[in-house]
């Protein structure tokens, strides 16, 4: 066999071996055969590791691809699920009230006359700055007050509910809108009481112990019935009315209060009047001189 014949046979054998290995045959510029993998990547002998053509981590020369997932795809969080939910606000802690004496009547106009305690009660409405200053004056002298709050005032000044309680005072219900409750139908009267009770419950954790009718010193039987239906076993009236709502001078208001008050008295005053604020220090000084101590309505009847 001639040398040329042997060369042709050896070349044909190499080509057959490459074809049997599954590659496609192409010619290099220098005439050396090269294999092209089925994906189209040209592999020059000795330049690229042939395993890259079948390695699933190979990314066409752009670096390693991300490893293939080995399990079910993890669900991606939605905007709602990913959003942080604020913890719910804890309900307010209701005030702790002393138990009332078994002899406490359904409607209280005054407490025990033999004692030295009195209750200064305040219609809760008006300028919150006046109200806050009034509370501060009482607290500086160790006096405890009872604030009969109007529901619409609490809607406008919700912070005042906790301010009253945090000062050691007592908070009660004086209807939602301070209208003439005695002239209302039973349903209307109940709604006025219940709406204010709802505000107190939401802001303080309690509806309070006391209800006081609006635009009346005493509650009618109908009003007492509606108050009881809302949850108020006792109505708080008063026996001393110095009419501070008419804005007398501070000296005149002081004279009216100190000239009428005695042991057990429940005094009706108002938060939203400058004359009341101006007269309060002298009123507290006069009560102390008479040996009388301002306490909450519940303390008066305990």
Image (tube, grey):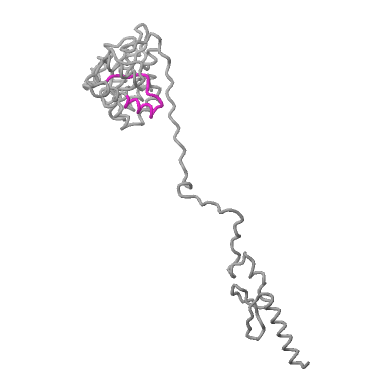
The residue under the point 50% across, 50% down is 77
Q: Quadrant of the C terminus?
A: top left
The one of 266 and 34 positioned closer to us in this rendering: 34
| Residue range corresponding to the magenta coloring | 194-213
Instruction: Indicate whether 182 appears above or below 131.
Output: above
- Is residue 144 shown in magenta? no
Q: Is residue 76 left or right of residue 299?
A: right
Q: Report if residue 205 is visible in the image.
A: yes
Q: Is residue 39 left or right of residue 168?
A: right
Question: Residue 221 location, x and y as percent?
Answer: 27, 14
Instruction: Indicate whether 23 appears above or below 299.
Output: below
Question: Residue 138 location, x and y as percent?
Answer: 35, 21
The one of 91 and 64 positioned closer to us in this rendering: 64
The residue under the point 72% across, 88% down is 8
Q: Report if residue 162 is visible in the image.
A: no
Question: Residue 121 location, x and y as percent?
Answer: 32, 19
Q: How many marks can you see?
A: 0
Instruction: Place residue 234 in its image quadrant.
Output: top left
Instruction: Place residue 132 in its image quadrant.
Output: top left
């Amino acid at each position: 066999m001639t040398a040329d014949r042997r060369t042709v046979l050896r070349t044909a054998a190499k080509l057959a071996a490459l074809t049997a290995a599954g590659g496609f045959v192409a010619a290099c510029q220098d005439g050396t055969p090269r294999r092209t993998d089925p994906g189209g990547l040209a592999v020059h002998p000795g330049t690229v590791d042939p395993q890259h053509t079948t390695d699933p981590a190979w990314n066409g020369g752009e670096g390693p691809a991300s490893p293939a997932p080995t399990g079910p795809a993890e669900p991606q969080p939605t905007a709602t699920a990913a959003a942080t939910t604020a913890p719910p606000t804890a309900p307010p802690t209701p005030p702790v009230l002393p138990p009332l004496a078994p002899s406490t009547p359904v409607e209280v106009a005054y407490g025990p006359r033999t004692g030295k305690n009195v209750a200064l009660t305040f219609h809760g409405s008006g300028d919150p700055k006046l109200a806050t200053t009034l509370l501060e004056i009482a607290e500086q002298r160790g006096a405890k007050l009872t604030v009969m709050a109007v529901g619409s005032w609490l809607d406008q000044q919700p912070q005042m509910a906790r301010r009253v309680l945090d000062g050691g005072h007592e908070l009660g219900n004086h209807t939602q809108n301070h209208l003439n409750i005695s002239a209302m139908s039973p349903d209307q009267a109940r709604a006025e009481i219940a709406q204010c009770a709802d505000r107190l419950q939401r802001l303080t954790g309690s509806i309070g112990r006391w209800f006081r009718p609006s635009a009346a010193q005493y509650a009618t039987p109908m009003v007492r019935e509606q108050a009881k239906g809302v949850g108020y076993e006792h109505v708080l009236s008063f026996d001393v009315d110095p009419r501070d709502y008419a804005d007398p001078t501070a000296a005149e208001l002081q004279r009216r209060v100190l000239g009428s008050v005695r042991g057990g008295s429940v005094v009706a005053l108002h938060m939203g009047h400058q004359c009341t604020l101006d007269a309060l220090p002298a009123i507290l000084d006069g009560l102390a001189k008479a040996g009388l101590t301002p306490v909450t309505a519940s303390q008066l009847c305990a």
